[in-house]
Image: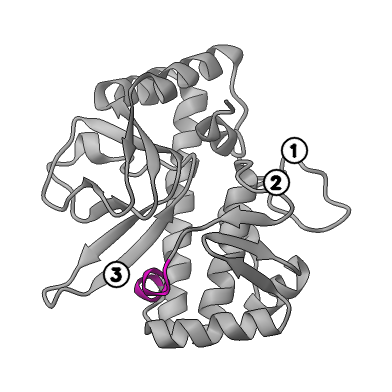
């Protein structure tokens, strides 16, 4: 099968054949299957391994004192859940699945060796961390300045680009098995309000949903509705312009 970790990281910098072979071995050597709504790591825990999403859907989240949950980030195929865990004493948030998922455990000692001895891989990992920070900044803007419609439209379009970049979609249709409560926990809205916004997006002909499957019917229209600028993702495949060439690298990234 295609390696989503390599597909994601080669958006940032090309790898040698040797690097690809090494990453392939690390990706598929120690894989565990999780069900939906299971914790991979809990706040306060430590792990000697890094965790990589191979398939499925996971998230970073916090639980407030009153029991409410805030989803901080969605983690899709090719995403490292905890890139820095091997140098931290303990997790400061939870990582859990939202759908059945396959998660690879990459030893922290091996990650350290990659950072020290594989400059191409180290650069890609650095870019991945910068992308994580960029996505988090957009979530801050969501809660500070975007209205409910803009938050959800923006998030759906972001997922479209991220999943497209690692080949996890077909004809702008992708699996995103979220409940309205999940979306509410990610956007700071109520499930009722989320339902209203999704209904509006359907009525406008921008999206369609069928169970856990989502389709973006009008990518250009959704992008306009979300006022979306994809520059923060730094993904060279993330274009819907007819003249853009998939696989052509963006200049000036490094």
In the displayed structure, would residue 141 be above or below residue 107? below
Q: Which residue has dot 3 on it?
A: 70
The answer to whether the residues at label 3 and label 1 have Cβ atoms under 8 Å apart is no
Dot 2: few (<14), some (14–19), or many (≥20) neighbours within 10 Å? many
What's the magenta bit mostly, secondary-structure-wise? helix
Which stretch appears magenta? 179-186
Can the viewer see residue 145 in this picture?
A: no
Q: Quadrant of the C terminus?
A: top right
Residue 79 rendering spot, x and y as whole percentages:
44, 43
User: Tag count in the figure?
Assistant: 3
Is 31 placed left or right of 79 in the picture?
A: left
The answer to whether the residues at label 1 and label 2 have Cβ atoms under 8 Å apart is yes
Q: Nearer the viewer, residue 35 or 138?
A: 35
Q: Which mark is residue 247?
A: 1
Residue 97 rendering spot, x and y as whole percentages:
33, 51
Can the viewer see residue 30 in this picture?
A: yes
Q: CA distance from mark 3 to mark 1?
A: 35 Å
Q: CA distance from mark 2 to mark 3?
A: 30 Å
Residue 116 rendering spot, x and y as whole percentages:
36, 22
Q: CA distance from mark 1 to mark 2?
A: 6 Å
Element type where label 3 sits in the image: strand
Q: Is residue 184 magenta?
A: yes
**Residue 126 in which image quadrant:** top left
Q: Which residue has dot 2 on it?
A: 237
């Amino acid at each position: 099968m295609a390696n989503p970790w390599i597909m994601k990281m080669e958006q940032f910098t090309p790898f040698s054949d040797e690097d690809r072979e090494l990453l392939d071995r690390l990706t598929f050597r120690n894989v565990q299957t999780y069900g939906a709504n299971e914790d991979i790591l809990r706040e306060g825990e430590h792990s000697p391994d890094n965790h990589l999403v191979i398939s499925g859907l996971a998230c970073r989240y916090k639980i407030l004192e009153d029991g409410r949950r805030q989803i901080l980030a969605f983690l899709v195929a090719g995403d490292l859940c905890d890139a820095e865990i091997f140098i931290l004493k303990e997790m400061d948030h939870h990582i859990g699945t939202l759908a059945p998922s396959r998660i690879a455990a990459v030893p922290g000692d091996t990650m350290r060796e990659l950072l020290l001895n594989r400059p191409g891989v180290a650069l890609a990992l650095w870019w991945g961390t910068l992308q994580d920070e960029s996505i988090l900044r957009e979530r801050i803007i969501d809660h500070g300045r975007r209205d409910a419609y803009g938050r959800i439209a923006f998030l759906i379009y972001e997922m479209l680009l991220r999943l497209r970049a690692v080949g996890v979609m077909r004809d702008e249709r992708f699996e995103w098995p979220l409940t309205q409560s999940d979306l509410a926990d990610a956007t700071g809205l109520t499930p009722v309000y989320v339902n209203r916004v999704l209904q509006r997006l359907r009525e406008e002909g921008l999206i369609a949903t069928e169970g856990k499957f989502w389709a973006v019917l009008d990518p250009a229209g959704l992008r306009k509705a979300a006022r979306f600028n994809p520059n923060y993702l730094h993904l060279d495949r993330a274009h819907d312009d007819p003249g853009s060439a998939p696989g052509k690298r963006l200049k000036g990234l490094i």
